[in-house]
Each structure stands twice: as C-alpha cells, then as structure tokens.
Amino acid sequence: MTVLEQDDTIGPVDVAVLYFEGSKFNGEVAPALLELQESGIVRIIDIALIVKDFDGLATFVELEDADIAEAFDMVDQSLDLLSEEDLAGLAEGLDPGSSAIIVVWENTWAGRLAAAVRGSNGRLVALERIPHDVVLNALAALDQPTMDAINTYFVSWAAKEVGLKVALSGLGGDELFAGYPTFTDTPRFSRLIRTAWFVPGVLRRLIAPLVATLAAQKASPGAGRKAASAWVYPDALPHPYFFTRTLFPPGQLERIIEPRFRPSTVGADGVTLDPTWLGWMEKTAAEARNREPVTGISWLEMRSYMASTLLRDTDAVSMAQSLEVRVPLLDTPLVEFVASLPDAARRRPGTQKALLVEALGDLLPREVLAQRKRTFTLPWEEWLRGPLRARLEASFNEPALPLAAYLRPGGVRGVWIDFLAGKTTWSRPWSLYVLNEWCRRHLAA
C-alpha cells in the first residue's frame, strides 16, 4: 500500500537532515530510529546518506548497498521520495570532510489522531510546530521547579509571535465554578478515608491492591495509587483533597526521598516555631472544613494549586515573553460574591461549571456549553518516549549534586520504568526531570 492510498490516515511527513563531522558513525542512529518506528510513533519512509570528502566531492550512498541495508531495514523500500536533485541540493550545504543522514518519516501518531478526530466529525483548524530551541528556552525560563508551566510558555510564545502584548486568561474558572475533577474526587476520598479509620492497618495493607485496581478502572493508574495511599495512610495528609492533588502520595514518596512529616520547624532565631509545608496544609485544611463541601474545595484549590502553581507559573513564563496576562475571573468582587454563595447555587448535577454556564448561556453557542472539560496537554507521552527519552535518561543517571544527597536513585528509576511500561503517566517522570535540571542550573554552582 502506498502513501497516497493511505491518505485517509496518513500523518504529517518530516524530513530531517542529521549532520556529522567526518564520515564515521558509531551505530546509534539506526537503533534509535528503529525504536521510534517499533513504538508506533513514526514510520520511516526513506533514508539517504551523503558523504563529502575534503576536496568537496559528494557521494550519495544508496540504501540498497550491502553495508548499510541491514542497518536500515526498517525502511519501506517501495517508496523513494528523495531524488538525486534533492540530495545534490543538500550536499551543497555540507562542509568538506562531513556527512549527513537524510531521514523521511511519517508521524503515524498524528495520522491515528487525525482519523479519530474525523471519525468524531471534527477537523484540524490549526497546527503549529514548536521549535526545539523554544522547548529548551521554556525550561530555562522556569525560576522555580514546576511541571505545569511549559504549556503556558508555548501559548505566550505563540502570542508574542503574532504581536500580542496583553492576553486574557481563564484562570480561576475551574476553582470558582467547580470545574476540576477534584470537586467529585475529594468527597469519594473522604468516604474512603472514613472507612479506613475502622479497618486495622494490617488488613488495610492487604486490601490496598484491590483498592488501587478498582480506582484505576474508573480513572488511571495514578488515581489507583492515590486511592491506595489514602486507604493505607488515611491520616498522612490533613485533608482528602491533598491526596487527589499529590503526584507522589505517601507510600510512593518514600521510595524517592525521605519525607519529613513535621508540622513545624525551628525558625532562624532558634526559638520561633515556623510552619512547614505540612503545617501550612493543616491550617488551610482547617479553614476549608469551616465551609460547605464545594466551597471548601474551592478554597483549597485557590489557596494551594492555583496560588502556588498556576498563577505563579503564568506570571513567570508569560513575562519571559514580555506578555502581560490578565485574569478577569479572579476580580476581587467576583471572587467574593461567588465564594459567599451556598453550594446549591454553585453546582447542578450533570452540568459542569453550572453557575458560569447559566450566566453566559445566552452568549455562547450551545455546542460550546455542551462540551466536556478538556485539558490543554501537549503530547508529553510521545515526547518522553521519543525525542526527549535520551535527555531524561541521562538526567536520571546523573542527579544534580545539590539533589543527589536526598534522592533515592532506585525510586527515581522505578518511576521512569513504570512510565515506559505504561503504569504511570508522563507527569511523574517529567516532574523529577524538571526538578533535577532546575537544581543543576540554579544550585550546582
């Protein structure tokens, strides 16, 4: 079957030119390409090799040559997309005494996605390729370790590219109008924890795998781990909400570091007791319990995830692009008004962000109001298994010196192995990578 016969599911096709000093290769390129193809991320369509001697004479190496055919046998040789004219043009740009491998691949993952979108009566309306240096610049722009800022950095970068100076953000909408899954997950965890209090610890540990399996069936392996943690360690965190938000719940965290669950620590003056992260969480949880359930979760979202992660990340990465981001849904009078409403006014069964939908119902198309909540997530799963894999593995093999004394290498490797095996999501290894690289960049000097 040719490419043209597959045009209902064909993905975007890229041409990559891999430049090398000299004409010797160490044998790592072909296995890396083969791994990408076997994973289903790409399909290698055509490959050509150019060698340019010191006199400037270019030689085009045919794929059928015996010494390289075996190395690149993953290529569909029924396709021949690179012409001699193409190769001659590329050879002109090579320095004498250098070589290049030209690879043409189909992004099969994008083809599968496009077919699924068309099957749902959807269509692609925009496609933006984010340059590699922008990804590296995004990491460099983080002045604190965080895994949530990269997508906002890309949006800010794209806004700057088209000349925008100010942008409006919907931050606060999920927190105020109960849009996050935490508004349904927290009550479930609360019931689970109340049940766990009446079950002996030994029995809880025996039942934990079953709890994890049942929770994962309705969500993800990460949700299963969180549920098992809340079941085995019901008093480890001061509110069920914090179990729903943690990346590494109690029980898993100890495999990575030695956590210190202390509510206070001695201050700089040697006398005053300052609250630790746990002490702050206890105080915030106590304030949430004085409110109705939905209002309490909204309070926790705004005081923790929104304040310490979303708002701060948005400010840091947008300013890295000289973009001003405004948050109209966090206007003080609006927040105070919505926060004063009873839970019954803020939620409706089966309707997401019910109060906001009712307020804007006559201004937005019906198809917009009826859509399910969707996250803005970049293709991290594919990136971490493909082009970023070597970078993450190298980082994990060499922890930053300021962090090495605290990390447990076996636990970090375990997170990466679980990700490769499909037992956990991309967010866990990515968070460890960002932390390690931030420490290497800012603390290692």
Image (cartoon, rainbow, N blue to C red):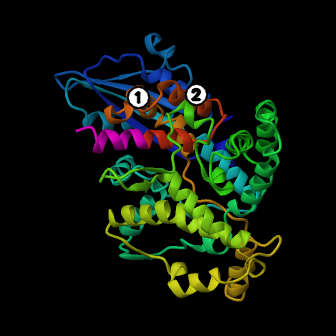
Residue at the spot 68% in from the left edge and 83% down from the top edge: 364
Judge left or right: residue 89 versus residue 351: left
Residue 256 placement (x, y as % from top left): 52, 33
**Which corner quadrant of the image does residue 437 belong to?**
top left
Which residue is at the front of the view, 284 or 170? 284
Residue 312 placement (x, y as % from top left): 42, 63
Residue at the spot 67% in from the left edge and 87% down from the top edge: 363
In the picture as drawn, the residue positioned furthest to the front comes out as: 271
- Residue density around tag 1, few if under 14, some if 14–19, many if 20 or more, within 10 Å: few
Q: Is residue 171 visible?
A: yes
Whether 136 is drawn above or below 389: the answer is: below
Residue at numbered disc 1 = 394
- Examine the structure image and report whether residue 439 is included in the region drawn in magenta: yes
- Magenta residues (range): 435-445
- Residue density around tag 2, few if under 14, some if 14–19, many if 20 or more, within 10 Å: some
Residue at the spot 68% in from the left edge and 70% down from the top edge: 178
Q: Is residue 7 visible?
A: no
Which residue is at the front of the view, 401 or 18? 401
Badge 2 marks a residue whose secondary structure is helix
Q: Quadrant of the C terminus?
A: top left
Q: Are marks 1 and 2 in contact (CB under 8 Å)?
A: no
Residue at the spot 60% in from the left edge and 73% down from the top edge: 173
In the picture as drawn, the residue positioned furthest to the top comes out as: 66
Residue at numbered disc 2 = 417
Which residue is at the front of the view, 177 or 64? 177
Residue 135 placement (x, y as % from top left): 40, 49
